[in-house]
């Protein structure tokens, strides 16, 4: 069998699932400005991005990037170890450390690499002895970091402290090298990790904490992030984040004690052997940080917009989560139930097998319904993110807003969801029904 055939089967299943609906992934962007994004030339309200403070197209941020290109050129063409380490990177690292409340920080070319490098290195420093206990919704880059470090990885239920405590008890029987790995704000659920409880458990069981604050940095605590929000930056060992969300740029960082950062700089392959962050992205991120400091009202505004949207969608009867600019609308159970004739038609001699088949069919229906709902919203000029397992625990539509949303933007989304409520039976139908539903 060809190597690629074996590896691509999960992707093939998703591809098969969207036949007749249209692939909701990889929509082709042909333009963007603020909250308006063009797909194949047609404008959509961007209700599924990460530019929470609307800084990606901010004039000061653009200008900073242009100036850096004029001064230094486009790329660094070197890793930090060689010719890629810039004074600009050092300035950014110092500002980031002070901003999130840690002694030191180091800049990576992406947030993914920051997680990969830091967790990978912690694992490599503790061969065969370290256990990482992660929230089940933790980001893929954290899991890949565990793989790189050869770390034993265990999961606990999302934001469930009893589940974490049970894992810690078991881990403690085996090792004293335990790392708890959590996001500050979860990228799909939009909820905040209960950091005070996590810190208390970590200290009780002698564990350290790695906090990926990709979606909290720039938003929570006027931008300082989740650890600062709870006043716990000094009790969290490692904080990482990306510049590709609130800063509107790209790149990432890890902040920790000076000793740890010096060690990482000397040891992390995803830092040492990767061309460093381009000057334009470094300067853009510095400009974004300055805007966060100058205009704290942006953070309050984006939270208020999200709260309004959440309340209005709940009023329509949708199950909505989150407590940040991320507003997930949970689709599980919207498109069918175990009493559906289609699902009842699935029978098997073995009762357990029959129950499993029906559960799977129900989940499949929810997944297809979620894809159809996303496509239906696209046709109404609104882009939201479809999430299905394993990308999320359950199928959901991830909405997110920015501080530049107008009341009209919120109304456009709410009106579309109001209309969509009445389309549910059609959206739940067979893949070809989308055409009829229109
Ligand atoms: C929670 C989380 N961590 C890390 C990353 C990786 O960041 P980057 O896009 O800078 O690689 C992302 C981006 O999707 C994320 O959502």
Image: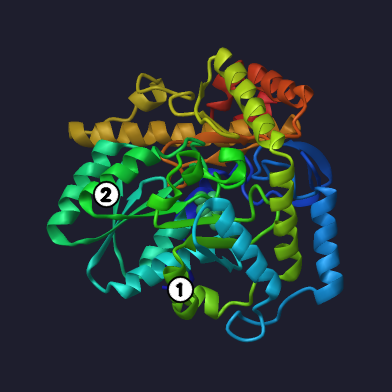
Q: Quadrant of the N terminus?
A: bottom left
Image coordinates of residue 224 in percent, x first then y, are 57, 46
Image coordinates of residue 62 in percent, x first then y, are 82, 56
Q: Quadrant of residue 126?
A: bottom left
Q: Is residue 147 above or below residue 49?
A: below
Image coordinates of residue 79 in percent, x first then y, are 61, 80
| Labels 2 and 1 touching (C-beta < 8 A) | no
Q: CA distance from mark 2 to mark 1?
A: 24 Å
Residue 30 in view of the camera: yes
Residue at figure coordinates x 19%, y 55% from the top left: 171
Q: Nearer the viewer, mark 2 or mark 1?
A: 2
Number of marks in picture: 2
Locate ligand 1 by image quadrant.
bottom right
Q: Secondary structure at mark 2?
A: helix
Q: Which of 326 and 23 lies nearest the eye of the viewer?
A: 326
Q: Quadrant of the C terminus?
A: top right
| Residue sitting at the far bottom | 82
Q: Is residue 103 left or right of residue 75?
A: left
Q: Is residue 353 left or right of residue 421?
A: left
Q: Is residue 374 left or right of residue 113?
A: right
Q: Is residue 166 above or below residue 140?
A: above
Image coordinates of residue 52 in percent, x first then y, are 67, 41
Mark sitting earlier along the chain (2/1): 2
Dot 1 surroundings within 10 Å: few (below 14), some, or many (20 or more)? Answer: many
Kindly identify which residue carries mark 2: 203
Dot 2 surroundings within 10 Å: few (below 14), some, or many (20 or more)? Answer: few
Residue at figure coordinates x 48%, y 25% from the top left: 335
Kindly identify which residue carries mark 1: 264
Residue 383 in view of the camera: no
| Residue sitting at the far left | 173
């Amino acid at each position: 069998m060809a190597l690629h055939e074996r590896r691509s089967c999960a992707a093939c299943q998703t591809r098969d699932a969207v036949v007749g609906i249209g692939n909701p992934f990889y929509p082709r962007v042909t333009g963007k400005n603020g909250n308006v994004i063009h797909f194949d030339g047609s404008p959509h309200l961007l209700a599924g991005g990460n530019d929470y403070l609307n800084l990606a197209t901010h004039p000061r941020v653009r200008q900073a990037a242009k100036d850096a290109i004029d001064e230094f050129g486009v790329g660094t063409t070197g890793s930090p170890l060689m010719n890629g380490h810039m004074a600009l990177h050092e300035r950014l690292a110092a500002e980031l450390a002070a901003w999130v409340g840690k002694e030191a920080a180091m800049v990576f070319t992406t947030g993914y690499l920051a997680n990969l490098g830091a967790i990978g290195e912690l694992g490599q420093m503790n061969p065969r002895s370290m256990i990482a206990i992660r929230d089940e919704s933790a980001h893929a880059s954290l899991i890949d970091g565990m793989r790189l470090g050869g770390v034993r990885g265990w999961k606990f239920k999302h934001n469930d402290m009893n589940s974490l405590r049970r894992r810690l008890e078991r881990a403690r029987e085996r090792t004293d090298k335990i790392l708890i790995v959590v996001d500050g704000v979860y990228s799909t659920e939009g909820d905040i990790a209960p950091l005070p409880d996590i810190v208390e458990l970590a200290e009780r069981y002698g564990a350290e904490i790695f906090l990926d604050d990709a979606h909290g940095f720039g938003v929570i605590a006027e931008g300082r992030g989740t650890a600062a929000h709870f006043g716990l930056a000094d009790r969290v060992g490692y904080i990482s984040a990306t510049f590709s969300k609130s800063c509107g740029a790209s790149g990432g960082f890890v902040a920790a004690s000076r000793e740890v950062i010096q060690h990482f700089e000397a040891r992390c392959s995803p830092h040492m052997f990767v061309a460093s962050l381009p000057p334009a992205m470094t300067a853009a991120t510095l400009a974004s940080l300055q805007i966060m400091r100058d205009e704290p009202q942006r953070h309050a505004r984006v939270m208020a917009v999200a709260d309004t949207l959440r309340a209005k969608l709940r009023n329509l009867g949708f199950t909505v989560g989150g407590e940040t600019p991320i507003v997930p609308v949970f689709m599980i159970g919207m498109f069918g139930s175990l009493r559906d004739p289609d699902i009842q038609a699935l029978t098997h001699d073995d009762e357990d097998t029959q129950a499993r088949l029906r559960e799977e069919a129900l989940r499949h229906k929810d997944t297809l319904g979620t894809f159809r709902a996303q496509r239906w919203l696209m046709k109404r000029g609104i882009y939201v993110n479809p999430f299905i397992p394993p990308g999320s625990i359950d199928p959901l539509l991830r909405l997110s807003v920015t501080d530049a949303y107008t009341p009209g933007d919120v109304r456009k989304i709410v009106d579309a969801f109001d209309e969509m409520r009445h389309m549910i039976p059609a959206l739940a139908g067979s893949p070809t029904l989308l055409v009829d539903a229109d």
